[in-house]
Amino acid sequence: MFKKNDAVIAALLLVLAIFSCKKSDSPADVKSNFVGNWAGALQVTGSTVPLKFSLLIKEDNTLINIDSAFSNQVFPGTYTYTADSLKITYNNGTKWNLRFSNNYTGCAGTFLGFAGATGTVNMLKK
């Protein structure tokens, strides 16, 4: 038969097993879904011409934007993320606030440029 200590140990092991099997809700769980190559367009408020770009999002929370509209000029930056959003800060001060869509194959939102320009950004994962 079980002794009192055996019952306590069994209960503790059961609790430990339940909590160790709980699925994590950390944003790190989604990172592999969006790291990679993206392509999109930026629309400055008041302009009718979309500015195309390619974006490489790296595993180490850095990125490189290759701006097709400006002779393939490279704009490096960093990012933070949650399960449903991506915030990009470029080294020149430009900031993008985006929301993921379509199971991390799409992303859209707004930007605030380093010179005060505002607009929208839309991109798709390649």
Image (cartoon, grey):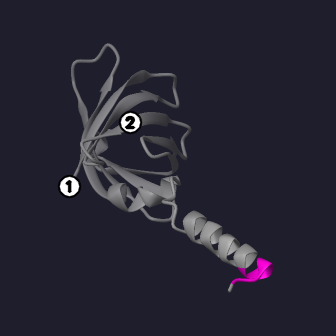
Sooner in the amino-acid sequence: mark 2 or mark 1: 2
**Circle 2 or circle 1, nearest the eye:** 2
Nearer to us in this view, 88 or 27: 27
At mark 2, the secondary structure is strand
Q: Main secondary structure of the magenta part?
A: helix
**Residue closest to the far top:** 46
Q: Pointer 2: what residue?
A: 99
At mark 1, the secondary structure is loop
Q: Residue at x 49, y 41 (%)?
A: 87
Q: Is residue 13 above or below residue 75?
A: below
Q: Pointer 1: what residue?
A: 126
**Residue closest to the far front:** 1
In the image, residue 7 lies at what x, y percent? 71, 76
For the record, the magenta segment spans 2-6
In screen coordinates, is 42 left or right of 89?
left
Question: Quick one: label 1, few (<14), some, or many (20+) residues within 10 Å?
Answer: few
The quadrant in which residue 49 appears is: top left
Q: Amino acid at mark 1?
A: Lys
In the image, residue 25 lies at what x, y percent? 51, 52
Nearer to us in this view, 35 or 4: 4
